Amino acid sequence: MRPSEAGCDQASGRINSDRIKSQRIMKNGKTGRRGFLGKAAVAAAGAFIPPHVISATAWGMTEAGSPNDRPGIGAIGMRYQGTVITLIAQNQGRVVGIADVDRNVREQARASFGSTPLIFEDYRQLLDRKDVDVILIGAPDHWHAKMTIDACRAGKDVYVEKPITLTIDEGKIIRRVAEETGRVIQVGSWQRNDARYRLAVELVRAGRLGKLQKVSVGVGPNPTGGPFPERPVPGALNWNLWLGQAPEVPYVEERCHYTFRWWFEYAGGKVTDWGAHDVDIAQWGINEFPAEIDGQGKLPNVPNGYNVPVDFRGVVRYPSGVELLVDELSRVGVLFEGEQGRLFVNRGSISGTPVEALKDDPLPRDQFRLYDFDNLSRPERVGKLDAIVNHMGNFFDCVRERRRPISDCESQHRSATTCHLINLAIRLGRALRWDAQAEAFVGDDEANSMLSRPQRKGFEVV
């Protein structure tokens, strides 16, 4: 199946489920104390994670093929998450190039990967390399769409961190480019490869809660802060290239690196940060696209300060009548409620009526139905680092076989869209009606004008 085969019926707004071929299931291996400590060290690491901290063996991975048939990997954006995914990906291929707009980051990243990868300030030079087959993108959110599109057009397959887009229209462009180029795109919404989340959605879609009525997602509160001082641009940082499509502004340390998440110019706060994970899981279970969205929240008015909403709450209604609540007060995770019970799942647990019933009415792994290219020889895993191992493995499986990844660009565009819709309803301060087939607001020119944003010349997403 090509990446463009989205697995959804746009006319009805309902996502199709695919049957999974029965395969032999490998039992989970146990991780000993040494492996646990190694992974704990990785989780606690800062911007860089030396590859020797944890080996492929400790994660239960084996390298794919001989050196001659291992794809060349290029990595863009090498602060914490970019290094995490590159570390895991190197067990499937060869890291041949690294790009980052911060010289200190790229040079330390190069040292962390044996001082052998080439390094670049401008990612486009990396895309020009003929020895690069796969691109990993760990750059800030406002760069995800353009880098993905440029990489596809350069003939590369792409693993891009979530959320896939900064705006709704960017997702439409990514879908078109994926269709035109036939490239494989996996988005880093790794919870789809966490055994707890996958089981939860399979149970919901198998009807184990009866008719689904409500889903609640807690994403936690957005930080507040500012005004922040303008500072000289650090000598190692290309601030203009970091800004990309975003408006040109003086350098403020809090706009950059990790805290970019709390500025609408570059991201969408917790709604798109954690929402790209848990709203994705919720919508995977709901199996529909939004019809109505309402949102409330306070927009900070602090000069040169964080501007994502506080005290926020979004309500999304679907054609079947299911209601999705996304807010900062609910327990972080996903709570599904149906006529026959409730099911809660987060990164540490899964509980509820259908889970308790599994001892008498099991749902074996080979009876899962929501994804048609499962590799059942890969042990089930839970937790961020282990789940990313399977998520990256799924990506490389799909690169080799030219199949649709579990977090393909269409499903993730639709999940990101729901997050963007909530933020737009909060910013506009009113309820919105959404036509999921046309991907436009109904009778609301102002809201439709916010499907995209003005972009600086030279950095347009087209």
Image (cartoon, helix red, strand yellow):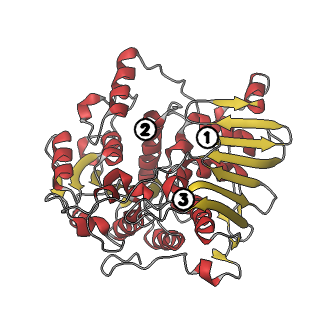
Q: Which residue is mark 2?
A: 389
Amino acid under disc 2: Val
Image position, residue 22 (x, y; %)? 64, 38
| Res. 368 in view | no
Q: Secondary structure at mark 3?
A: loop
- How dense is the environment of label 3, judged by Cα within 10 Å: few (below 14), some, or many (20 and up)? many
Of mark 3 and mark 1, the one earlier in the sequence is 3
Decide: few, some or many residues near mark 2? Use Cα within 10 Å; few <14, some 14-19, many ≥20: many
Kind of residue at badge 1: Gly
Q: Which residue is mark 3?
A: 309
CA–CA distance in space, label 3 to label 1: 20 Å
- Up the image or down, 450 lies above or below 309; here it is below
At 69% from the left and 64% from the top, the residue drawn is 294
- In the image, what residue type sits under mark 3? Pro
Please tell me whether mark 1 sits on a helix, a strand or a loop: strand
- Image quadrant occupied by the N terminus: bottom right
In the picture, the quarter occupied by the C terminus is: bottom left
Where residue 446 appears, as percent x and y from the top left, is 60, 81
